[in-house]
Amino acid sequence: MTENHKQFETSAIHDGYDPSDLLGSLATPLFQTSTFTFETAEQGERRFAGEEAGYIYSRLGNPTVSVLEEKMAALEKGERALGFASGMAAVSAILVALTKANDHIICSAGLYGCTFGLVSMMKEKYNIEHDFSMMETKDELRQLIRPQTTCIYVETPINPTMKLIDLEMVSEVAREHNIPVVVDNTFASPYLQRPLELGCDVVIHSATKYIGGHGDVIAGVAVGTREFLDNVQMTTQKDIGGIMSPLDAWLLIRGLKTLPIRVDRHCDNAEKIYAELSSHPNVSRVLYPDDHDHPDYHIRQNQMKRGGGLISFEIKGTKKDAQQMLNNLEFVKIAVSLGDAETLIQHPATMTHAVVPEASRQKMGITDQLIRLSVGLEEWKDIWKDLEQALDRL
Ligand SMILES: *Cc1c(COP(=O)(O)O)cnc(C)c1O
């Protein structure tokens, strides 16, 4: 990759697209096409043989999707990015690319619900075993590494408990054994955390969340070296087929232009809401990475620019009370997903993590009283007023 000296904010707007390539169009054109015509049969032969650059068929590449991929590669400081139909399409394409039958994966103790489902299915179908680890020390991680270990898979901040994992530490141990580290960076976004700069190998996003930012797209992205992602493109992406649609890429390109200012505002609001929640009498515990007493606060300082827009909190009471708190809200919306302009709230034990067996949920710290909040872009005082009246009425 050519040296890119632009600042993040500028890259998010300008990288990956030059209007002079396309009739001066300021906005990236939407190439809503399934296929591309060849001028001659011989040209078609050359394109398929890889002797001539150019588009063939949108599952193999599309100009609008390519712009989004170049922007994401620049923002995550990777050589190449690939767009996918969903975050889970990206997760599954990467994990299937990195494993074969009887291999072994080490995962952070705390995974997105469907990723947990995927690794369980890989165990059942292909005997690909997995271990969960808190990844708090190098030794804890080293003890789990086997000759068959082909991937270390990390989420940080962990959903929904907001525990952090030291990515530099994990990548140092992985390097001793040449094991690739894959990081689901959805919660932080590349604006707050860049795992490749910390020595990790692959970054995955559910672009549905902060990258899109407006709750109107489901999409995923993976970023890493050109060699690895070229291989993914020609195998698990092309042949399993979970590609990103051109329209979704177009919406994500628009979303990315405001990613830095949106995420800063999400963080500003979350810091205020965190402080208010912490002193509410009906709240027993608040989990937020920017909490100075958070056991992982030093990790937050080292690897995240700010604390992010997600807060989890436990209320005093029962599962019924937690559900009542959600029902008491006026404009804060009850919904899974996160990173949207609207403040969203959900109950992990019965929603995002309902598929996780009760015992594993307990181990992960997902109690019936735990509520997850994705702080939106509204005026923070309005968000707090709504949360406060809902809590007061318990
Ligand atoms: C939403 C999410 C996913 C899955 O993404 P989809 O776009 O819904 O497929 C994966 N990881 C995390 C952390 C998520 O929040």
Image (cartoon, rainbow, N blue to C red):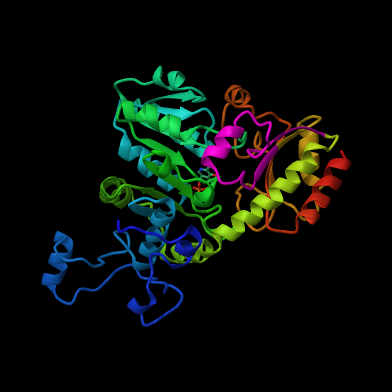
Q: Quadrant of residue 17?
A: bottom left
Q: Can you say which quadrant of the picture contains the C terminus?
A: top right
> Exactly how many numbered labels are in the figure?
0
User: What is the residue that sits farthest to the right in this orientation?
Assistant: 393
Whether residue 118 is in magenta: the answer is: no
Front residue of this view, candidates 167 and 145: 167
Residue drawn 42% across and 40% down? 198
Residue range highlighted in magenta: 283-312
Image quadrant in which the N terminus is located: bottom left
Q: Position of residue 326 (x, y in %)?
A: 77, 44
Instruction: Give the residue at the far bottom of this rendering.
Output: 23
Indicate the position of residue 48 as horizontal and vertical percent values.
17, 61
Residue 158 visible, this orientation: no
Identified at 31% across, 33% down, the residue is 99
Query: From this viewpoint, which residue is outermost toward the front?
Result: 5
Residue beneath the point at 18% across and 77% down: 39
Give residue 36's position: percent from left, percent from top. 27, 71
Q: Tell me where residue 270 appears, x and y as whole percent.
A: 69, 48
212, above or below 365, in the image: below
In this image, 236 relative to 388: left or right? Answer: left
